[in-house]
């Protein structure tokens, strides 16, 4: 096993221990004997120091020309590219997903950096006509200040990149709290920023628990806005706290995503899609395919092929290139998966047709492994069909028409990602029109977002903001309207031009 890394907090351009001196361990969920890293268990004092550093750095960073900020971000992206394999290997060790997927996670951060760097020569405002002669009107973007980021464990470097790179190109400074289960990837990210030459205090990382570090970031008066990705329960609580403080808050929360397969679909393609969507990342994606909605004409044959293919998925340590699915990220997540499997077995007419058990014996005993699991006979409204599980548990629902498929698809509290397989172009465009989700794939699985398109959902999935793409810039900037009077006299809008 590789030697564990012993990280510190990154505050004001320096690596420092927590004020309280406490540390905690980060272990491989595929092999708990593998100690990946240790890191500080921090508290509000460390957040105070990080925010103070970020506030001081903001005064200089906001004045750096955006193209120059973009060059630094591009340099960081190039360093990520050079360190891609090393970072990906550690990410697999700390959160479990297979190495091909962690390489993709790192690549997403590279892509996001390159995209954000280009915005350094855009960050477009607006020029507009005004009512008076010899007067000019425009709207420009201004940075907001110190941005707090609270990130999850399932995409330990991609999601931080979605938040930090756009904030930085806009001229803001950052304080990030990584998930307690995956601090090493964000620590590696801080090393990248340091190597790229970002000024001290522009980026800061404080590791530790949500009740200590996360709470302190939310409540700190010098944190101007907060971006959060995580559970619905925590997100809604934080939204209320930020609302009471008058602090803008971006939330990307849960999903209960469905793949619809119509009777005219390319069935082999749809089969590949649901296997990847449901069992990629061990189902631990907010965009994972948790529901499969099948037209009754193809239901039985499709389920038969799906079960046969899913049986062949190899579960194991994600560092093994031949493995298809890694472990649950933690014992708690494994218990959640098993709990929902038990719920499903008790629901009337739902039938467990594959999996449902923890994998044991040999190397499995060292980690948190579970079988790919499929339920058929699931009905709309069942808990299995309504509640987010965040594991490799797929619910299959039979429908008789396109209209019924859309009703079932939309009948959840969430609206993140969606998918339909059909060769009928009219149905495809009706699905785009009628599905209530922030993302819709036609003839593709529910996972696979790219950084240059908006990411986020509707209903209980979030609070209306989007991450990635050009739309995220609206969260990390304030609009300022500017009027330039060059007439040499007082001109009263809405009065003197009547």
Image (cartoon, helix red, strand yellow):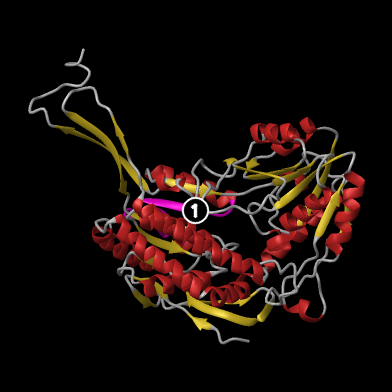
Residue at 54% of width from left, 73% of height from top?
84
- The image quadrant of residue 1 is bottom right
Residue 222 lies in the magenta-colored region: yes
- Residue annotated with mark 1: 228
Residues rendered magenta in the picture: 214-231
Q: Please indicate whether residue 441 sits to the left or right of residue 455 in the image.
A: right
Outermost residue to the left: 488
Q: Quadrant of residue 459?
A: top right
Quadrant of the rendered image containing residue 436:
top right
Q: Is residue 70 magenta?
A: no
Q: Is residue 349 visible?
A: no
Instruction: Provide residue 450's location: percent of width, then percent of height.
Output: 57, 53
Seen at 23% across and 22% down, the residue is 131
Q: Residue at x 47, y 44 (%)?
A: 240
From the top left corner, tell me how far across and down residue 233 is, in percent. Answer: 58, 49
Location of residue 36 with respect to 172 vertically, above or below: below
Whether residue 464 is situated above or below residue 29 in the rendered picture: above
237 with respect to 134 (left or right): right
Does 54 sit left or right of 107 as displayed? Answer: left
Q: Quadrant of the C terminus?
A: top left
């Amino acid at each position: 096993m590789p030697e564990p890394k012993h990280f510190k907090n990154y505050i004001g351009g320096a690596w420092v221990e927590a004020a309280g001196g406490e540390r905690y361990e980060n272990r491989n969920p595929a092999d708990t004997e593998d100690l990946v890293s240790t890191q500080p268990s921090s508290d509000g004092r460390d957040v105070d120091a990080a925010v103070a550093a970020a506030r001081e750095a903001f005064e200089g960073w906001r004045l750096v020309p955006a193209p120059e900020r973009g060059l630094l971000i591009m340099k960081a992206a190039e360093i990520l590219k050079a360190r891609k394999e090393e970072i990906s290997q550690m990410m697999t060790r700390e959160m479990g997903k297979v190495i091909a997927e962690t390489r993709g996670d790192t690549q997403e951060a590279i892509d996001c950096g390159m995209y954000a760097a280009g915005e350094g020569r855009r960050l477009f405002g607006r020029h507009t006509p005004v009512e008076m002669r010899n007067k000019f009107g425009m709207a420009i973007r201004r940075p907001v200040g110190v941005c707090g980021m609270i990130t999850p464990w399932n995409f330990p470097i991609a999601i931080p990149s979605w938040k930090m790179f756009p904030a930085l190109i806009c001229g803001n400074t950052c304080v990030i709290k990584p998930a307690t289960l995956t601090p090493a990837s964000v620590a590696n990210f801080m090393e990248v920023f340091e190597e790229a030459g970002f000024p001290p205090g522009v980026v800061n990382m404080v590791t530790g628990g949500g009740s200590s570090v996360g709470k302190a970031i939310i409540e700190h008066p010098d944190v101007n806005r907060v971006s959060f990705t995580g559970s619905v329960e925590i997100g809604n609580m934080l939204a209320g706290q930020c609302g009471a403080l008058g602090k803008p808050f971006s939330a990307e929360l849960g999903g209960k995503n469905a793949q619809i397969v119509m009777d005219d679909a390319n069935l082999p393609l749809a089969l590949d899609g649901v296997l990847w969507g449901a069992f990629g990342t061990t189902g631990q994606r907010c965009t994972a395919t948790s529901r499969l909605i099948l037209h009754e004409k193809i239901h039985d044959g499709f389920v038969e092929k799906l079960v046969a293919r899913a049986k062949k998925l190899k579960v194991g340590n994600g560092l093994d290139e031949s493995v298809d699915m890694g472990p649950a990220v933690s014992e708690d997540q494994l218990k959640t998966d098993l709990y929902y499997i038990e719920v499903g077995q008790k629901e009337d007419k739902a039938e467990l047709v594959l999996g449902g058990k923890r994998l044991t014996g040999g190397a499995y005993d060292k980690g948190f492994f579970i079988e790919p699991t499929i339920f058929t006979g699931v009905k709309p409204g069942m808990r299995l069909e309504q509640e987010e599980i965040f594991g490799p548990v797929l619910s299959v629902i039979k429908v008789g028409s396109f209209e019924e498929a859309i009703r079932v698809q939309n009948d959840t509290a969430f609206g993140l990602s969606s998918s339909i397989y059909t060769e009928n172009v009219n149905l495809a465009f009706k699905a785009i029109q009628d599905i209530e989700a922030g993302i819709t794939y036609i003839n593709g699985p529910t996972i696979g977002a790219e950084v240059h398109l908006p990411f986020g959902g509707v209903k209980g999935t979030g609070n209306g903001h989007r991450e990635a793409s050009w739309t995220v810039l609206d969260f990390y900037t304030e609009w300022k309207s500017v009027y330039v009077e060059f007439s040499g006299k007082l001109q009263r809008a809405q009065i003197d031009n009547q």
